Amino acid sequence: MIRLETITLREIRLPLRQPFVSSAGRVEVRRCVLTELVTDRGVAAWGECVALEDPSYLPETLDSAWHALERWICPLLLGARFQEPREVSELLEQKIRGNRMARAAVEMPCWVLEAVDQEQSLAALLGGERSRVATGVALGLAGSVQETVARVQQAIAEGYQRIKLKIAPGMDFDLISAVRRAVGPEVRLTVDANGAYTLESAAALQRLDALGLEMIEQPLSWEDLACHAELQGQLETPLCLDESVTSVERARRMVELGSATILNLKAGRVGGLAPAVEIHDLCRKHGIPLWCGGMLESGIGRAYNVALASLPGFTLPGDLSPSARYWHRDVVTPPWTMDSEGWVQVPRHQPGLGVEVDRDYVEDLTTRKRVLRR
Ligand code: MG
């Protein structure tokens, strides 16, 4: 039984070690919305909203998520009783359209409350089987081809099992072929276009078939599923979807249409862990491999990603970089680490999330806070 007494919303500003540069711009400080749920029995669980500052990935933003949480989502949950976390997801699905990143920020910690109640790890509660997960890295845009090659070589030396690079029209074949030449045929390379191409400009993508990429991620618009299926018919390289799959329903359509043969699954994008596990089961049934992408989360969001990536359908390396890659100091203890062969351990031996939140540090970083009560 879950009955929430309070939900605390916080915004923190977490300084990055190095600016992260994408087509959307340059981020030096990650603004994160954190949630803390406390039950009527005094049990607490933290969550994190994956929304970015701007609507460059999906329409939701950090500020729109804050508003939806404060105005509609938290009041809905604070008035209700739930036998199990799946009911939280069902209620949110019934009452709140869209706003899935905001919904996930409170749905996901309900699974931690359940895990603590059952005295098992979040990974075990979700059906995770792995004790360690394979890790790749997504590299932001660099200034030049030489600089990109150097950063790829550095990441390989650090042990990452797969390297993902961002591409865009005019910055694709020459860049990626230079990287392929430099690193050799064995290194697992993928590219992510974040919807920058159209079917008309996709001829450039056919050239990538010669470069032995593991996948091309999200080449076409986030709103599209049908054109991706058409494009897959023109390419040998497997397509992977990310921002096009925002729900269980969209995942079903992806499978029916054949829009992609790989899925980057992020629980925060689809409304939480209940829909994420449902999509996992669907993809597994249809032989679609999964991996878990990142949204520049703090160590709290990372904990959920690692637990999810321990499920059996996640057969490709995820973007689960250690804390030290992004942060001078993470908000959790112990911080996330990766070994020299690119493995991250799944905390399976303690109940709940598997990391402690450094409350004093979070308090220092907090720039706004709102406590909502039943
Ligand atoms: Mg992506």
Image (spheres, grey):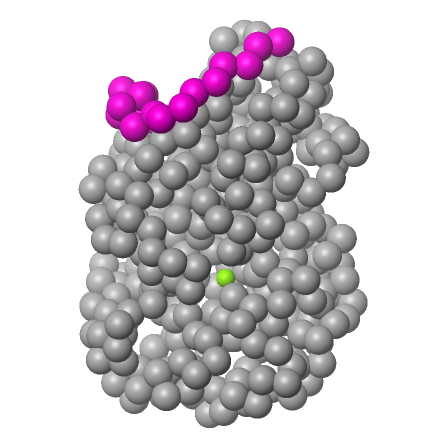
Q: Nearer the viewer, residue 149 or 264?
A: 149
Q: Is residue 349 above or below residue 173?
A: above
- What residue appears at the point 31 percent right and 43 percent down from the top-left corner? 29
Quarter in which the C terminus is drawn = top right
Q: Can you give x and y, in whole percent of width and height, for residue 3 in the image?
A: 63, 13
Quadrant housing residue 237: bottom right
Q: Can you give x and y, in whole percent of width and height, for residue 87 in the image?
A: 72, 28
Q: Can you give x and y, in whole percent of width and height, for residue 208 in the image?
A: 48, 87
Chain part drawn in magenta? 350-374
Q: Nearer the viewer, residue 288 or 53?
A: 53
- What residue appears at the point 50 percent right and 39 percent down from the top-left corner? 62
Quarter in which the N terminus is drawn = top right
- Whether residue 269 is visible: yes
Q: Is residue 77 above or below residue 349?
A: above
Q: Is residue 241 above or below residue 349?
A: below
- What residue appears at the point 33 percent right and 60 percent down from the top-left corner? 21
Q: Does residue 51 belong to the magenta stretch?
A: no
Q: Can you give x and y, in whole percent of width and height, for residue 241 in the image?
A: 59, 65
Q: Is residue 146 above or below residue 39?
A: below
Quadrant housing residue 2: top right
Report whether 205 appears left or right of 356.
right
- Whether residue 36 is visible: no
Q: Does residue 373 belong to the magenta stretch?
A: yes
